Amino acid sequence: MSAADGAGVSIYDRLWRSDAETCALLAAGTARRELVAVFGVVEQALLAALARRALAAPRRHEESVYLLPGIMGSQLGALRPAGAPADLLWLDPQDVIGGALTRLRLPDAAPLSALGAIPFSYLALQLRLRAAGFAVTVHDYDWRGDLDELAAALAARLRADPAPGIHLVAHSMGGLIARRALQSPDLARVRRLVTLGTPHGGSYGAVQAIRGTYPVVRRLAALDRLHDADFLASQVFSTFPSLYQMLPPPASASGADLFDAAQWPRTGPQPDARLLDAGRRFTVALRGAEPRCIAICGTLQRTVTGVRLAGDEFVYQVSDAGDGTVPLASAQLAGSDNYFIRCEHSALPRSATVAHAVLELLRQGRTKRLAALPGARGGREVAVSDSQLRTTWNDKIDWAALAPEDRRSYLNQLNQPPRQYAPAR
């Protein structure tokens, strides 16, 4: 059987563990070779120390804390019969190599289960919260789906929690799900929502994912032996309702109404007009202040901050005003307290400084660990077109030839900015 048909058991399937199992192994110092293979030597040592602190810490706070990953931040797969490893699809590079990302296509994909947050991204934050005496629940979810439905599922889970108070800590798209859930009038027990790099005003990464020019899509295509980036964009990623619900609204730095299919290029991967309409409805429904929200915004990373239609392609405006994925203007939320740190988008939940600031915000509603103003911008703006981005990551990766540390680095840096984003000298 090939990895692509979902029947074969890969090494990444065998390495999968629940958060509880992983924490127990880290704290006990067992399965070290396996955990080093997953995290690397430095990260394994850090997580082992955090796991010991977390397991030894008594609960000091009555409130529950829910940790929401961002888009692509939950592992997805299918459960096998008892005793067999789960069939991990996202993110199993062996499945990607075999062309199995087509199993993510909606609505005709076979059902997939959320199998916990991606440990490299979220385990450290979870352990730091637990070590501080909070009871932490990781709310993983199928990030391809409609955010209204995902918000309804979160709201139902929060209603069932008997704790006298609840806090939410949400990374990236998880913050949009949380804000939508908090529009339910019966969730007054939720005291604070802390968002980390949430695209409150949308992200141009969603535009690029639909167009096949997003770094993540192109690097995945470089692994995929059967498909290129345009195929993955048009046949897989453009079927996800969530991407359309993160498009920047017309009033943003974009000169176009990105919810209007007529204002997209006519060649290359195209948006789904039906999903564009649903994305517009979600954006309108989400408007309005959320006084319980505190936004932590990354900045001083090369970020797409605007887009315009030029001829028959998009041209993206790139500057340092963002975290590499979410523009600085989009990460802030009007009517809420906003804090700023020089940090890349995927590194926000891994940052010890951010974690300590989150703890202060949950306890006190304010922090001095982060800047209250975004600070000066650096680096000049550049313009990068779809056609320029399509010159990147066209050669296939020989995964078998990579050393273990190079494989980890490749997977952990899927959204690293391409060379065209660098300012001209």
Image (cartoon, grey):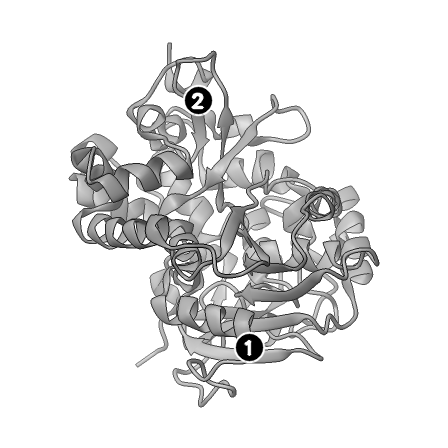
Q: Position of residue 142 (x, y in %)?
A: 59, 38
Amino acid type, label 1? Gln
Judged by depth in the image, the label closer to the viewer, 2 or 1, is 1
* Residue at 51% over, 88% down: 373
Image mark for residue 364: 1
* Residue at 43% over, 20% down: 4
Label 1's element? helix
Distance (Cα) linking label 2 and label 1: 42 Å
Q: Mark 2 points at which residue?
A: 87
Q: In which quarter of the image is the C terminus?
A: bottom left
Residue 245 or 371: which is nearer the viewer? 371
- Dividing the picture into quadrants, the one containing residue 225 is top left
Above or below, 152 against 90 in this view is: below
Q: Position of residue 45 (x, y in %)?
A: 20, 51
**Residue 264 in sight:** yes
Above or below, 143 against 83 in this view is: below
Amino acid type, label 2? Asp
Residue 160 or 267: which is nearer the viewer? 160
> Going by the image, does 195 lie left or right of 128?
right
Of the two numbered discs 2 and 1 on the same chain, state the one appearing first in sequence.
2
Q: In which quarter of the image is the N terminus?
A: top left
Above or below, 284 against 37 in this view is: below
> Going by the image, does 108 lie left or right of 100?
right
**Residue 413 in sight:** no
Residue 149 or 214: which is nearer the viewer? 149
Q: Where is residue 274 in the image (x, y as percent from the top left)?
A: 79, 43
Q: Quick check: marks 2 and 1 in contact, CB under 8 Å? A: no
Image mark for residue 332: none
